Amino acid sequence: MPDPIRLGIAGLGTVGAGLVKIVQDHAELLAARAGRRIEISAVSARSRGRDRGVDLSPYSWEDDPVVLARRADIDVFVELMGGEDGPAKASVEAAIAAGKHVVTANKAMLAIHGQAMAEAAEAAGVALRFEAAVAGGIPCVKTLTEGLAGNRMRRVMGVMNGTCNYILTRMESAHLPYDEVFEEANALGYLEADPTLDVGGIDAGHKLALLAAIAFGTRVDFAGVELEGIERISITDIEQARDMGYRIKLLGVAQMTGRGLEQRMSPCLVPAKSPLGQLENAMNMVVLEGDSVGQIVLRGAGAGEGPTASAVMGDVMDIARGYVLPVFGQPARTLESAPNARAAAPAPYYLRFSLMDKPGVLAKVATALGDAGVSINRMRQYGHADTAAPVLIVTHTTTPDALAHALKGVEATGVLTAAPVAIRIEEV
Amino acid sequence: MPDPIRLGIAGLGTVGAGLVKIVQDHAELLAARAGRRIEISAVSARSRGRDRGVDLSPYSWEDDPVVLARRADIDVFVELMGGEDGPAKASVEAAIAAGKHVVTANKAMLAIHGQAMAEAAEAAGVALRFEAAVAGGIPCVKTLTEGLAGNRMRRVMGVMNGTCNYILTRMESAHLPYDEVFEEANALGYLEADPTLDVGGIDAGHKLALLAAIAFGTRVDFAGVELEGIERISITDIEQARDMGYRIKLLGVAQMTGRGLEQRMSPCLVPAKSPLGQLENAMNMVVLEGDSVGQIVLRGAGAGEGPTASAVMGDVMDIARGYVLPVFGQPARTLESAPNARAAAPAPYYLRFSLMDKPGVLAKVATALGDAGVSINRMRQYGHADTAAPVLIVTHTTTPDALAHALKGVEATGVLTAAPVAIRIEEV
């Protein structure tokens, strides 16, 4: 049996502790599968004293993850600290420079620095793996990079932020408004310290940008992801969508178009009977569409100690088995800078307007939409008990540009009592 | 760039032709991803003259696949002929002996000869890959062997015969009896030449046996798969299941129990709202449950030119990228011979009895069940217009042994007009 492969783990939160548990509990199983033993040489975290429910006494301790990354007795540096810069970036760079393989769960860091890090790792001949950074336990990076490597990818989609999906499904099942469920989620510890990362779609946008790079052979372009969060989704929207046979999801879509790479992470109506529409609570789903394979759907837990540690361990096992491939599936220096497609393909939209309760307002809205070339498929208006009776409209297929133009026209009529809500209807 | 990797393809049906198309159409894309060109050196099939919609003129032709397998100008032998013995087996063995990597879609061959072939391939230091043999385009072999390599697997499940799933969903949606839909499927060319391979569960059983070997580190044991086909499922069963919130699927389940390895492929009732329950038409689904990752669900096309060729190509790409791992995820000689658990874990069952239409028959059935320790949760009886009024029973949780005993008791009463139907209710 070849020499053991030795890990240095930086970051001992739930995922780090989960990884230590797997290495300790499954030592024989992992050795049988990898053909060599998986060992931990050293660990690092902010606080040495904290009880993490695992015995760390067999391992060396480093206060500084950069020092850990350079230790002669590690082969793989596992970065589980998070943060797009700071110690995470410094230690990953140090590990690569020292010729160590790297496994990370850090989507924010890779979404920003992925290109430079991939070039450095490939120049050094080491692996830089990040399965755990995208959709937690779901091996979607591997599926896309390896299993579907014979396909020209057509589209990549995903519900990749469990917290947002929890909020949206909880709003529907408990008939509760956004703010209340947001507070619940916060109390349950589901939200990042900066909740905008979750509900603003940033975290999921990072993940989408990483998948898009692999799928389309392009440089990671997080800045090119059109981002919209779920903050403005109301219980009305959710219930109206349901009545029409849809569910609202924070959906990521990336596809290569004639105008360039389209990447967006935004609330969408998806058919309630589709796998995406049926995804509940904090689950994640990734949908991969290739020219040969058709549509592959992957579903699993998007976060949590076990699932995320499983993804990290999968990467470690590939490295232990000797598999080192380019970070994004083809050499980083060959990745192209695709133009940003900006506007998405045409689609029908769901619109909600809060209107002043006086005669003629509806006609003004309809006229403004028509003037912009946006035609109405269905319209509903509910009781006039309050002064902001919502009007709900489903348009025929229209371009995002025409829609934006139409919404400006509606706002210019001066009959709205709140900003309009427009949600794309995505055929998935 | 390293030397091209050169394929020899034996079998030019739809999948073989699909593979040739991918290699021809995506030459640059594949080269960018693999870091070397993918070329075809030679091909073989039964009939040289047939038009397969692809240009085969650039490639050498061999009438004998065994000769193809040994050619000096191929690195990877791709076996797409099928059949558990005969030319498929002979040529794969010849390829391994000649030091060639092998990619095959042949589940029947591997389910019977997988252990010996894996040992031979590993001794020769070549890859023997079979992603296309299990669930078509779904990269489930890769996910299980690599992505989830850090998990002790708890259970593997799957709907892995698209034809059976088509028949069952078509019976429900069109309200048609089994025989009629079977003929439809046959006319559409969905069935194997020997339809028992499909509707008898054999094909799906082969696939389950392969996944179980990887999941549990055991020798492939197709003989140990408890097989039951869908031939006795009636439209009554399907509609009753639906009314109770279930769907009937030909479901494979493999799990390691205290009594040994349990493997079964049989019709089951699964919750209609579960991903398995929602799977329609010819789609396949594989559910992988690991101790860390929880439940991962994979969904995609289980057959067809594109999806199957995609799976073959994924294997070829791994080999081209230099990844050779043990055939079943750990060295074949270390795979254990697990005892066959024989009976499955306890579960509730759905029962259908066709009874003589005379007084007291129902009491006799209930008594026979009770005598065997099988208790009734719900019972329904429909109109007595014909002489074979079906009685539908859902039992409380019971062991398969107790159930078998109970069914014998019911048959012994002499009140049945047809063999009883018993379908397990599986919590998925």
Image (cartoon, coloured by chain):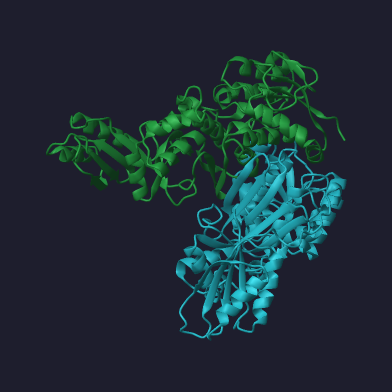
Chain colours: A green, B cyan
Q: Position of residue B12 (x, y in %)?
A: 67, 59
Q: Nearer the viewer, residue A375 or B415?
A: B415
Q: Nearer the viewer, residue B378 or B165?
A: B378
Instruction: Left or right? Give the position of B333 relative to A211.
Output: right
Instruction: Left or right? Give the position of A317 relative to A369.
Output: right
Q: Position of residue B357 (x, y in %)?
A: 53, 85
* Quadrant in the rendering for residue A383: top left
Instruction: Left or right? Give the position of A204 relative to A314.
Output: left
**Up-down: is B264 above or below B27?**
below
Q: Quadrant of the N terminus of chain B?
A: top right
**Up-down: is A13 above or below B182?**
above
Q: Is any atom of residue A252 visible in this view?
A: no
Q: Nearer the viewer, residue B233 or A150?
A: B233
The structure residue drawn at horizontal position 52% and vertical position 38%, both measured from the top left corner, is A282
Instruction: Left or right? Give the position of A219 relative to A92.
Output: left
Q: Is any atom of residue B338 visible in this view?
A: yes
* Quadrant in the rendering for residue A300: top right
Q: Position of residue B248 (x, y in %)?
A: 56, 63
Q: Position of residue A352 (x, y in %)?
A: 28, 38
The total of numbered circles placed on residues is: 0
The structure residue drawn at horizontal position 75% and vertical position 26%, both measured from the top left corner, is A55
* Quadrant in the rendering for residue A342: top left
The structure residue drawn at horizontal position 62% and vertical position 19%, both measured from the top left corner, is A88
Residue that protrudes farthest toward the left in the picture: A359
